[in-house]
Amino acid sequence: MTTKTLALVTGGVGGIGSAICEELVQRGYQVLANYHPSEEARAKDKQKAWKNAGLDIGIVSGDVASFASCTDMAKAIKEKFGTVQVLVNCAGITRDKTLKKMEEADWAAVLHVNLDSVFNVTKQFIDGMTEAGFGRVVNISSVNGKKGQFGQANYSAAKAGMHGFAMALAQEVARKGVTVNCVSPGYTNTAMMQAIPEDVLKQIVAQVPMQRLAEPDEIAYVVGFLADKRAGYITGANISANGGLFISF
C-alpha cells in the first residue's frame, strides 16, 4: 500500500494522458496509468521510458468502455495500491464523420469510450474518496464539447456530456471534500495531430488566436492545479485551455 496520494489516469499512455501522469508524479503523487488491454506492449514500452527518465509510474490494464472491466481494475488497484483519491478521466477516441455518413457503430464507440467511461471508472472510486474526506475527479473534455465541431456530432456530444456529469456529481460530493471538474483543451500537439496533413494542420493553427497548438504539458499543468489540495474550493468548473479558440463566460 502506498503512503502517497494515489492518482489514476485513464488513457494514461496517450499524448495528453502521459503528460498528466508525468505532471502528477512530479508533484509527489503515486501515479497509475491506465491502458486498454490491447495496448499492453505500448504501455510497457512507455513505462520503461518513464523509468529511464527517473519517473516511477505504474501501469494498469482496463477497458474503460466496459463496466465489468473497470470493476476488475478497481479491485486490483485497491488490493495492490490502496484507495484512489485523484482520478483523471482522459481516455478518448474519435470517429469523425458528418451525421449523414455516420454509422451507429461510430456513434456508439465514441460515446462508450469518451462518456460511458466517465461513469464506469468514477463509480468505482467515488465512495472511497468521500469516505476518506478527500478526492479529486478531473475530466478531460474538449473545446469542441463547448462550441461543437463540423463532423464531430458524436465527439462533441460526449465531451459536453462529461461536463454535465461533472456539474451534477460535484453537487453530490461537495460536502465530503471531493471536487469534480473538467479541463477543455484546444488542439494539442500530440501524435494524433501530427498525423494530420501539413496543409490541414496549418489551417487549424490559423484559427487559433495564439497561432500554435497547445503542448501536452500545458494541459497537464491545469490538471495538476485542480488536483492540488489548495484547489479545494473549485468544483463543477470547466477550465478552458484552448489558446483563445473559443472564449465565453
Image: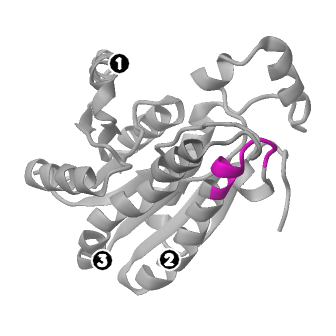
Q: Which residues are magenta?
A: 149-157
The quarter of the picture where the C terminus appears is bottom right
User: Vertical placement of 87 versus 99: above or below?
Assistant: below
Mark 1 vs mark 2, CA separation in Å: 36 Å
On the rendered structure, is 155 left or right of 76? right
Proximity of marks 3 and 1: CB atoms separated by less than 8 Å: no
Identity of the residue drawn at 41% across and 81% down: 173
Task: Please tell me which residue is depicted at 49% across the width and 33% down the height of the picture.
Answer: 19
Image coordinates for residue 14, horizontal then vertical, percent:
47, 30
The reply to whether callout 1 and callout 2 are in contact (CB within 8 Å) is no
Query: Which SS class for mark 3?
Result: helix
Q: Nearer the viewer, residue 63 or 100?
A: 100
Secondary structure state at the residue bearing disc 1: loop
Q: Nearer the viewer, mark 1 or mark 2?
A: 2
Q: Can residue 148 be seen by looking at this rendering? A: yes
- Amino acid type, mark 1: Ala
Q: From the viewer's perspective, is 242 left or right of 23?
A: right
According to the image, label 3 marks what residue? 130
**Callout 1 environment at 10 Å: few (<14), some (14 to 19), or many (20+)?**
few
Q: Residues within 10 Å of mark 2 (few under 14, many from 20)?
A: many
| Mark number displayed over residue 170 | 2
Q: Residue at x 76, y 41 (%)?
A: 98
Residue 235 shows up from this direction: no
- Disc 3 crowd rating (10 Å Cα; few below 14, some 14-19, many 20+) is some
Q: Nearer the viewer, residue 81 or 99?
A: 99
The Cα atoms of the two marked residues, 3 and 1, are separated by 34 Å
